[in-house]
Amino acid sequence: MTEIPLSARARAITDSITLAITARAQAMKAQGIDVVSLAAGEPDFPSPDEVREAGIRAIREGQTRYTSATGMADVRAAAAAWFRRHYGLPYEAGDVIVTAGAKPALMLALMAVCEDGDRVLLPAPFWASYTDIVKLAGGEPVIVPAVPEQDFIHSGAQIARAARESGAKGIVLNWPNNPSGAVPTREQVEEIVAEAIAAGLWILSDEIYARLVYDGREHYSPARCKGAFGRVLVVNGGTKSHSMTGWRIGFLAGPRAVVDAAGRILSQAMGNACTISQRAVLAVCNETDDSALRERLRAYDERRRFVVGAINRIPGLRLATPHGAFYALIDAREACARLRIDDVQLTERLLADAKVALIPGGPFAIPGFIRLSYAASMKEIEEGVRRIAAYLS
Ligand SMILES: Cc1ncc(COP(=O)(O)O)c(C=O)c1O
């Protein structure tokens, strides 16, 4: 019992749904229940040897002190070079700050640009944390309804209309997308960005899955679009591509004045990202041989193909082929209608009765759908899909 009242800010936000469901699945496992978890967006591969060795070396060398809050100079320079090399974005070291993961980078970016009450467009489906991160920064999330019939990619006109009707100041874009796996073509990115800029929006582009694309697709950063470089803030890092979830390290890049402001907030609110993790992420930025990454991609691709085939054979479920990240956003509207339940109840039943953990679409602003993460071993995926099929057949 506490007599300390919570702030409106604290009351406005909820637990991360993905973390909550993953924790529930883990608790069931701890009780000896055989649960297959396809909930977490966390690679099952270990961090690459070079990353781990760099971290160990940093500890041995005694690199365990504070760094500049915005990151070590050589890490910022290496990150800028990595943005140039992989994404065609001409950043310099001073345009990039190092953060404790992509999540704080998003938070800092929004805190640097959002005024209280500013509306921020969130094209659905979107990563469930966006609504609360926008609220924490004082903004007001405005959901742009999902367009599954357009492979989850909005037209420029749909974005323009949402901006006009809401009076939004900014937009959060996320390609490759969590949860849909959508990867728009360069032309589609250009169309959306052109409309966003014409509507006067700033753009926060979350590109944390940029290296995880399939079918010969290419990630095209919104910051590369005509006239966009000065209006786009880019979040990226090695979390997903290099299995670095626990290291807590990421980057925010963009126009110098905004990134500097985000850096000041970082310096007062959080301090530098872990020094050891900064040394470790250098191994990602300086990587010259990407054969190990391509090997991981091949494994994800194999799982993806299996999931698409197997899910589409289950009555009541449909799955359009995702082209990026490691998620399958399954259309379960027919199954839900047949069982007279919604997506939240469906995932609850699948966990309780079939012992398989998935995430409902509701928190991603796409009710009637469920998200399966194929960043799990093929064995777990096969067993998980078998259980879903058995439950729904
Ligand atoms: C779209 C998206 N952005 C950001 C993050 C957070 O990444 P990090 O672990 O680097 O903070 C996630 C994690 O699941 C994500 O899916």
Image (cartoon, rainbow, N blue to C red):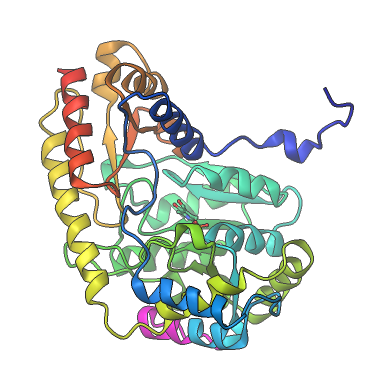
Vertical comparison of 21 with 9: above or below: above
Coordinates of residue 360 in the picture (x, y in percent): 40, 31
Residue 52, image quadrant: bottom left
Q: Is residue 129 left or right of residue 286?
A: right
Is residue 308 at all visible to an observer of this figure? Answer: yes
Coordinates of residue 338 in the picture (x, y in percent): 24, 13
Residue lying at 34% horizontally and 52% vertically, measured from the top left: 153
Residue lying at 47% horizontally and 80% vertically, measured from the top left: 282
Residue 225, image quadrant: bottom left
Coordinates of residue 373 in the picture (x, y in percent): 31, 44
Q: Which residues are magenta?
A: 81-92
Residue extending farthest right: 3
Check if residue 82 falls in the magenta segment: yes
State which quarter of the image contains the C terminus: top left
Check if residue 172 falls in the magenta segment: no
State which quarter of the image contains the N terminus: top right
Q: Is residue 63 left or right of residue 289?
A: right
Residue extending farthest front: 60
Vertical comparison of 291 with 215: above or below: below
Q: Is residue 85 left or right of residue 268?
A: left
Is residue 233 at all visible to an observer of this figure? Answer: no
Residue 192, image quadrant: bottom left
Q: Residue 223 versus residue 253: which sits nearer the camera?
A: 253
Q: Residue 119 versus residue 108: which sits nearer the camera?
A: 108
Q: Residue 273 versus residue 223: which sits nearer the camera?
A: 273
Coordinates of residue 229 in the picture (x, y in percent): 51, 78
Residue lying at 39% horizontally and 43% vertically, measured from the top left: 40
Q: How many marks?
A: 0
